[in-house]
Amino acid sequence: MTTQVKHAIGIDIGGTGIKGGVVDLETGQLVTDRVKLPTPEGGKPDDIAEVTKKVLEQLDADPGLPVGIDFPAVVRHGKTMSAANVSKKWIGFEAEKFFEQAIGHPILFVNDADAAGYAETEYGAAKGRQGVIMLTTLGTGIGSALIVDGMLVPNTELGHLEIDGHDAEKRAAYSAKEREDLSWEKWAKRLTTYYSTLEKLFSPDLFIVGGGVSKNFAEWGDLVKIDTELIPAQFLNNAGILGAAALAAKQRS
């Protein structure tokens, strides 16, 4: 990656925790301990901004470093257009401007799946790969990121594709496997339907699977019968931090 700065700060805001760290932009490694504080109950903007400030204070990093913040929402031009597991006050909210005022520092605000996908492309499972790369996170829902020749196409939200009359993530997310007590084989059939649909729409060169269930990839990966290469993500808990930091640095460069 071409950038004039060596380090950047990434903050990953989730439904249960707010995590942060300083990232070496060349290697994708954290150069500080990761700081994690609980996401405040209710997830309102003022409360989340206050905890984010505390994370930054505990990192005690150079205030001149780029800061990227990822969040579980569609983010358009710094405005959050949706809200998942947080207050509905985020819908239509000028999040980027609000956080810049709250912490007194320019930031980049980005969707969490987009940040994770960018991290995998820059430093992880898809490093050095060109073409159309799609990351999907299989968890409570399905998050997605689309990267074309290293360029992020933001806010794809492909977990919400309608397939066979259903919101795709309602049947294919890992939560569906747990909720319905599906075997790996039965769940993999649903994933085959989901990924086959993505193949028809996007003709990708590579699928990366993130989320906690990627740790069990050896048990179910070969059961997904598609033409496109399917591999597990390299990063789990730190993906958002790395991607948010890298995107913030890229914006500044």
Image: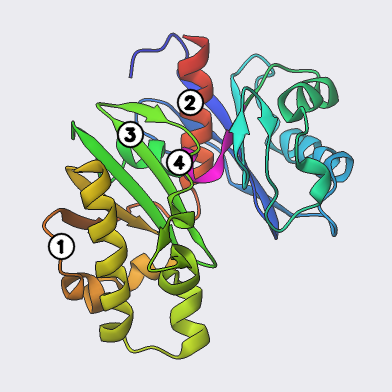
Label 4 vs 2, first from the N-terminus: 4
Which residue lies under the disc numbered 4?
156
Which residue lies under the disc numbered 2?
247
Residue lying farthest front? 165
Which residue lies under the disc numbered 1?
226
Residue 126: x and y, percent?
24, 41
Residue type at mark 2 is Leu
Region rendered in magenta? 109-115
Numbered badge on residue 147: 3
State the separation of the CA atoms marked 4 and 3: 10 Å
State the separation of the CA atoms marked 2 and 1: 31 Å
Callout 1: SS: loop
Residue shown at 75% from the left, 41% from the top: 91
State the separation of the CA atoms marked 4 and 1: 21 Å
Residue 57: x and y, percent?
77, 34
For marks 2 and 1, give the one nearer the viewer: 1
Residue type at mark 3 is Ile
26, 154: nearer the viewer: 154
Q: Residues within 10 Å of mark 2 (few under 14, many from 20)?
A: many
Numbered badge on residue 167: none
Residue type at mark 4 is Thr
As drawn, is 146 to the left or to the right of 247?
A: left
Label 1 vs 3, first from the N-terminus: 3
Label 2 vs 1, first from the N-terminus: 1
Quadrant containing the N terminus is top left
Q: Residues within 10 Å of mark 1 (few under 14, many from 20)?
A: some
State the separation of the CA atoms marked 3 and 2: 13 Å
Label 4 vs 3, first from the N-terminus: 3
Residue 116: x and y, percent?
45, 44
